[in-house]
């Protein structure tokens, strides 16, 4: 279906409506944070948010709406290329349901539905089942322009250091920024790296394989035989990309006996799971994480059906890649039952959480509490999960031992690092935002407020202007000096 785009004016009108709605909701949004200065007397930022994808934007906007505007968002990508949506995500539609909310922070005019209706029409919104990925990208770009956040693009953070007074964020190129608090909104790979099994990296030259999250030129797959290891949503995205580009044959191999066909993320989208998953015993968090790891998210149905519509697409179960080698010009793969020869292979094998893989996290990793420091697993399973940071209920890092890392609590992980401690509300997804963003933002404003509690009386005492201007005869009656004259000093 070709959609008629309403004029650009419609989106401008919507932006005006958002501004009017924000004005209507203006109560208690005025600035309240006392300025702070670093050791050299330079003003400090109150909050630096690393990452200007959807999470960074929503956290930044939520702070603005709570009167915290001395903030800065940093993103290593150029403007318009933040996050996954306009870079390597290949799903035609996003997997989340179209009525998903969170980014708009409760303001209907700022929602994806209002955006889509303004851009196309109400009827067009009613007719789509899910939100096209590029519409979600366009929505985020529009959102960014409407809420007017201070963002610095092309600003890759390479180091984060902390002390009891603040956090120093260093950028590639040499700049250093001092902030009181820092939020990591760095996405799915923000706590490690996309994972390609060693068996692939050690056996093949780099140009013969990709991770499903790589940006690659799909046209190079024309007439090629393509092998995909993995069967989750990203595996189907790659399969469709290869088939559409004219691959001769695509074989998807999964280790397990069946395809993941339950969209487990959707089932957890309840106020209970999203708002309270951080608040259950560690043993239950551990068991749940293990259970959910075994239930990979099912593919988006449009990509599943599209892949299956090609006669040259094959799925193989119980087909983990036991042996991989370059044999002449072919990639030879053996599973327990079959042998394959491929021109190119993809690892759709997810992400590894390992803070040592990210230079900017090394100083945090050295001293933060990890799950292995606080929890003994029942049967030594899931060693990878033990390397997740053990965060408190506010997405906040905590010291491994008391006194070891003063200032580490000034850093908040609103990224993949939070998924063990925060459960489903920690998964980096749109789903988590409705409850996750207010939670982390309350923790940030609470921190800032607490740091000025010794000045609360000074704050109230600083207001000298009476709320009522008395006319002269009333001043006389009340024994007050004429306006402009000093109060008599009492003996
Ligand atoms: C293929 C694919 C499809 C997906 N589909 C869905 C879906 O349908 N629904 C859903 O809810 N989720 C989906 N996800 C999950 C998805 O990643 C998130 O929903 C979304 O991208 C998370 O937004 P974010 O802002 O937290 O992180 P991201 O969008 O990843 O943004 C993180 C930003 O941080 C920046 N950054 C990282 N490190 C640094 C650094 N050191 N210095 C400066 N900047 C840095 C990056 O440049 C990036 O712009 C999908 C993920 C993938 C990979």
Image (cartoon, rainbow, N blue to C red):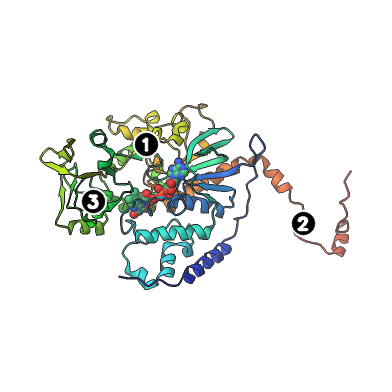
Q: Mark 3 CB in 8 Å range of ligand 1?
A: no
CA–CA distance between discs 1 and 3?
Answer: 46 Å
CA–CA distance between discs 2 and 1?
Answer: 54 Å
Q: Mark 1 CB in 8 Å range of ligand 1?
A: no
Which is more N-terminal, label 3 or label 1? 3
283 and 124: which is toward the camera = 124
Percent of width and height locating residue 244: 23, 57
Q: Secondary structure at mark 1?
A: helix
Which is more N-terminal, label 1 or label 2? 1
User: Would you name the residue on which mark 3 appears?
Assistant: 221
Percent of width and height locating residue 150: 55, 51
Percent of width and height locating residue 394: 47, 42
Q: Mark 2 CB in 8 Å range of ligand 1?
A: no
Residue drawn 88% across the image and 56% down it = 481
172 and 353: which is toward the camera = 172
Q: Is residue 332 left or right of residue 185?
A: left
Q: Mark 1 or mark 3: which is in front?
A: 3
Q: Is residue 461 left or right of residue 44?
A: right
Residue drawn 18% across the image and 57% down it = 308
- The quadrant holding residue 304 is bottom left
Are circles 1 and 3 on residues that touch, CB within 8 Å? no
CA–CA distance between discs 3 and 2?
Answer: 75 Å
User: Would you name the residue on which mark 2 appears?
Assistant: 466
Which is more N-terminal, label 2 or label 3? 3
Q: Secondary structure at mark 3?
A: helix
Quadrant into which the N terminus falls: bottom left
- Please indicate, yes or no, whether residue 170 appears anywhere in the rendered image: yes
The numbered disc on residue 145 is: none
Percent of width and height locating residue 384: 32, 34
Q: Mark 3 or mark 2: which is in front?
A: 3
The numbered disc on residue 282 is: 1
Q: Secondary structure at mark 2?
A: loop
């Amino acid at each position: 279906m070709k959609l008629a785009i309403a004029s650009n004016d419609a989106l401008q009108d919507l932006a005006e409506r958002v501004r009017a709605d924000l004005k209507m909701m203006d109560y208690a949004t005025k600035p309240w944070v006392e300025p702070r200065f670093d050791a050299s007397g330079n003003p400090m930022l109150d909050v630096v948010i690393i990452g200007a994808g959807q999470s960074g934007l929503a956290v930044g906007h939520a702070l603005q709406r709570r009167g915290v505007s001395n903030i800065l968002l940093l993103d290593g990508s150029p403007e318009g290329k933040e996050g996954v949506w306009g870079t390597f995500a290949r799903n035609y539609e996003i997997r989340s349901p179209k009525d998903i909310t969170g980014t708009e922070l409760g303001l209907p005019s700022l929602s994806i539905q209002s955006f889509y209706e303004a851009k196309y029409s109400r009827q067009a919104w009613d007719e789509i089942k899910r939100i096209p990925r590029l519409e979600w990208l366009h929505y985020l770009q529009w959102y960014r322009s409407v809420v007017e956040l201070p963002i610095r693009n092309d600003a890759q953070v390479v180091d984060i250091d902390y002390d009891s007074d603040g956090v120093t964020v260093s950028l590639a190129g040499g700049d250093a920024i001092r902030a009181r608090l820092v939020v990591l909104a760095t996405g799915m790979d923000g706590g490690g790296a996309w994972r390609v099994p060693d068996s692939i990296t050690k056996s093949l030259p780099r140009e013969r394989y990709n991770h499903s999250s790589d940006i690659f030129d799909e046209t190079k797959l024309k007439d090629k035989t393509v092998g995909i290891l993995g069967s989750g949503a990203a595996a189907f995205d790659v399969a469709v990309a290869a088939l559409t580009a004219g691959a001769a044959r695509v074989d998807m191999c999964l280790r397990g006996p069946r395809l993941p066909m339950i969209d487990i993320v959707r089932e957890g989208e309840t106020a209970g799971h999203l708002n309270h998953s951080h608040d259950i015993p560690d043993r239950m968090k551990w068991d749940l994480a293990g259970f959910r790891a075994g239930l990979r998210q099912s593919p988006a149905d449009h990509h599943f059906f599209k892949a299956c519509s090609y006669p040259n697409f094959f799925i193989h179960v119980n087909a983990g890649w036991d042996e991989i080698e370059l044999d002449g010009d072919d990639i030879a793969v053996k599973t327990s039952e079959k042998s394959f020869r491929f021109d190119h292979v993809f690892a759709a094998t997810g992400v590894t959480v390992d803070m040592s893989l990210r230079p900017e996290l090394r100083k945090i990793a050295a001293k933060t509490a990890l799950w292995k420091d606080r929890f003994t697993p029942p049967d030594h399973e899931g060693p990878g999960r033990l390397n997740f940071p053990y965060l408190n209920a506010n997405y906040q890092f905590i010291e491994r031992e008391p006194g070891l890392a003063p200032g580490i609590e000034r850093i908040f992980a609103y990224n993949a690092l939070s998924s063990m401690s925060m459960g489903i509300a920690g998964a980096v997804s749109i789903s988590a935002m409705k409850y996750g963003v207010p939670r982390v933002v309350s923790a940030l404003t609470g921190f800032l407020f607490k740091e000025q509690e010794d000045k609360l009386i000074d704050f109230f005492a600083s207001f000298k202007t009476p709320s009522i201007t008395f006319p002269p005869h009333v001043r006389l009656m009340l024994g007050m000096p004429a306006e402009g004259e000093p109060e008599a000093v009492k003996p």
